[in-house]
Amino acid sequence: MTRFLPVALALLSFTGCTLIDQKTFAPAQEAKAQPAPPQAPVVLDTRTALVTIDYSVPSPDFSELLHYAVRAAENRDADVRYDVISVVKATEDAAAGQERATGVMKAIMRDRVPADRIHLALRTDPALAASQVRVYVR
């Protein structure tokens, strides 16, 4: 009798279990795909840019203005971080936008700002008349 006791206890412990079959993993009938909620319009950036370089002309002269803005930001906070964001009209302009942002980053680095405090980004804005590079501090 004591030999069968563990077997009987094991069998009794499985009485509340059910076998796994295809119905176990099938979705419930009530579960239906819901349409995605409408998305709010994307806001590019609500911050005020330290410098906005407009590329309505092929080679804008921004170096002196950028130099003074970076020096002023560095004097306020020696550990300030910069977001250099190239904003282009369409994705086809991404390569040129990336090149422009890199040029602005190098200009900031000439003012002895370490590269690890400068963050590059690229965004599109179909409403733009001309491409821009915006420099933000954070």
Image (cartoon, rainbow, N blue to C red):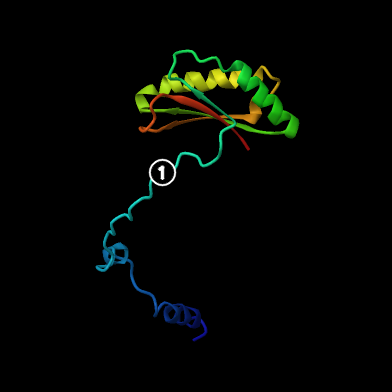
The answer to whether 79 appears left or right of 46 in the picture is right
Q: Is residue 91 above or below residue 44?
A: above
Residue position for label 1: 42
Left or right of 2: which side holds 118? right
x, y percent for residue 72: 70, 28
Describe the element under mark 1 as helix, strand or loop.
loop
Residue 78 at what x, y percent from top left?
74, 31
Q: Nearer the viewer, residue 44 or 4?
A: 44
Residue 11, placed above or below residue 69? below
Mark 1: few/some/many CA within 10 Å (<14, 14-19, 20+): few
Report the residue that reaches farthest toward the left.
29
User: Quick check: 80 above or below 4?
Assistant: above
Q: Amino acid at mark 1?
A: Val
Q: Is residue 41 left or right of 105 when viewed as pictured?
A: left
Residue at the image point whose x is 48% and y is 18% from the top: 99
Residue 31 x/y as whole percent: 28, 65
In the figure, residue 27 lies in which quadrant? bottom left
The residue positioned 56% from the left and 20% from the top of the image is 104
Q: Is residue 92 visible?
A: yes
Q: Nearer the viewer, residue 3 or 129?
A: 129
* Residue 3 sits above or below residue 85 on the image: below
Whether residue 78 is visible to the viewer of this picture, yes or no, is no
**Split into 4 quadrants, where in the image is the C terminus?**
top right
Q: Nearer the viewer, residue 134 or 81?
A: 134
Q: Position of residue 36 (x, y in %)?
A: 31, 54
- Find residue 137 and report its image quarter: top right
